[in-house]
Amino acid sequence: MALKAHIKKTRAKLQSLSFRTGVIILAMCVPFYILSFAQMLLPISAYAKGTLWFILFGLAKTCQYAGLTIIGAEGLRRLKKAFTRRHPEHRAIHPASAHYGSFIIKRKKRAKRPFFYGI
């Protein structure tokens, strides 16, 4: 019972941090992932390699999950929107219009479904 309370308290504390902090912590997981596998190229014993991998991979996973907890679901949407806004050439054609030569043909918009539609 005390463990559940501790987990809830830790999660609430992480979620109170800012979006920017979450992005920084998520970015920190990338070097840890790279280091956890790059250390296999070092000329050291297998025991040392296993220990280094355990520590670095654990740090990478910790940063990943902590960062995701901090930014939350809304933060993930913000990140996706920021990346699609920066790279317009990778975006798909907007579904409301199709481009055929120099003509733009407008398609009918479907009625929005209520949020409880599949329940």
Image (cartoon, grey):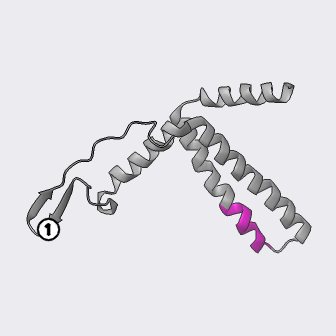
Task: Give the residue furthest to the left.
Answer: 102
Question: For residue 37: magenta?
Answer: yes
Query: Residue 24 sits in which quadrant?
Result: top right
Question: For residue 40: magenta?
Answer: yes
The x and y percentages for residue 37 are: 72, 66
Residue position for label 1: 100
Residue 59 relative to residue 119: left or right: right
Disc 1 on helix, strand or loop?
Answer: strand
Residue 3 relative to residue 59: left or right: right
Type of secondary structure dominating the magenta stretch: helix
Give the vertical position of 95 relative to 10 (above or below): below
The x and y percentages for residue 28 are: 62, 49
Give the vertical position of 86 relative to 16 (above or below): below
Q: Residue at x 45, y 43 (%)?
A: 77
The x and y percentages for residue 29 are: 64, 51
Q: In the image, which residues are magenta?
A: 34-42
Amino acid type assigned to the residue bearing label 1 in the image: Tyr
The x and y percentages for residue 41 are: 75, 74
Residue 41 relative to residue 101: left or right: right
Depth order, front residue of 111/72: 111
Query: Residue 23 sits in which quadrant?
Result: top right
Q: Residue at x 27, y 47 (%)?
A: 110
Give the vertical position of 7 relative to 90 (above or below): above
